[in-house]
Amino acid sequence: MQALLDAIAAMATVPRDAQRLFHGRGGLFPGCEHLALDAYPPVLLLTSFEPLADAALEAVGQALAARWRDIAPEGEALNWVYQCRGAQAETRLMAGAVPEPHVVTEAGTRYLVHLLRGQNHGLFLDMAAGRSWVRDHVKPGAKVLNLFAYTCAFSAVALQAGAAEVVNVDMASGALAIGRTNHELNGVKAGAKFLAHDIFNSWGKLTRGGPYDLVICDPPSFQKGSFVATKDYARLARRLPALLAPGGQALLCLNAPELGVGFLREVVAENAPALEWVGRVANPAVFADVSEDRGLKVLAYRAPAA
């Protein structure tokens, strides 16, 4: 885990925005493929996809404490959490405390997160470039459809950027409740709608609510009973032309290492051939991967103009 310790030693400042600090999962640091270090200020989160021995955790704690003494303002405590995912899942507060409520910022937008329960913390850091793309491409007065909205981060950004209306759709009412809080945190409650629906049973309602200037699709890659990318992305793509306004844009996301860019492009070409390929949104540099096909895929498309 030397690469992780080196990354900690190289931290120049105390992180103030939510961000990934070390991405072993990309395979660029042999022996660290199971490790990730994130900042959800004022807390650092160490995630491991296999159990870590007490000696390894002590080494990380010592490295963090030593660096904190050098870069933190006087009196600013080190707070860090360890989470192990997998068969021996656990979450442990290692030092300091986690605020409640815990609100972080990213590029000026505020989000409610929760590190001590569950494995999804309320904000996916690898999607930072996708949110930036939405901020840059939403036009004033736009109508946006946010599918698989989770905690509605895309929606908050779109409304901040000038969208007039965002319809957030997700089966998980609890996630949408956090989404409502995110809108309140950013003062953009007006224009936001929240539908706790199964998307595949709601096409009629969603189509009648359109057309949309931007449709965002960020589904889970595999969630039994909700979405399985290998069969359901085609069903999703077939609906896009009826949802999009002339010249409208679609942002299609897929986080499945086993399915590359070619899979998603072929799905769109076969099921929504009228959509024009615009390009791939580059992932944040810290999420670099040994293979671009393994990393998060965020693809932009455009509907034909009238």
Image (cartoon, helix red, strand yellow):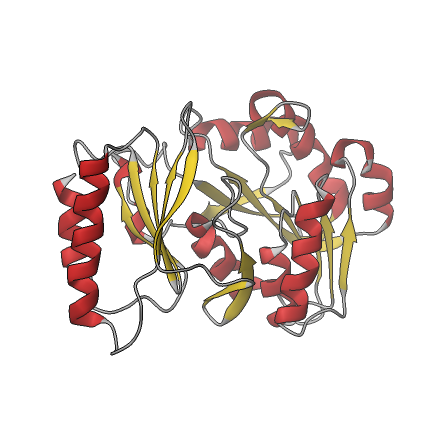
The residue shown at (31%, 43%) is: 36
Where residue 225 appears, as percent x and y from the top left, is: 68, 24
Judge whether 298 appears above or below 78 on screen: above
The residue shown at (65%, 34%) is: 272
Q: Is residue 146 visible?
A: no
The quarter of the picture where residue 191 lies is bottom right
The residue shown at (61%, 29%) is: 233
The residue shown at (86%, 43%) is: 205
Of residue 126 and residue 56, the one placed in the foreground of this image is 56
Judge whether 266 appears above or below 254 on screen: above
Is 89 on the left-hand or right-hand side of 143?
left
The quarter of the picture where residue 173 lies is top right
Is 118 on the left-hand or right-hand side of 78?
right
Q: How many numbered marks does the figure carry?
A: 0
Judge whether 152 appears above or below 101 on screen: above
What is the quadrant of the N terminus in the image?
Answer: top left
Q: Is residue 265 visible?
A: yes
Where residue 50 appears, as percent x and y from the top left, is: 32, 28
Where residue 243 appears, as percent x and y from the top left, is: 75, 45
Where residue 65 appears, as percent x and y from the top left, is: 20, 59
Of residue 174 and residue 155, the one placed in the foreground of this image is 174
What is the quadrant of the C terminus in the image?
Answer: bottom right
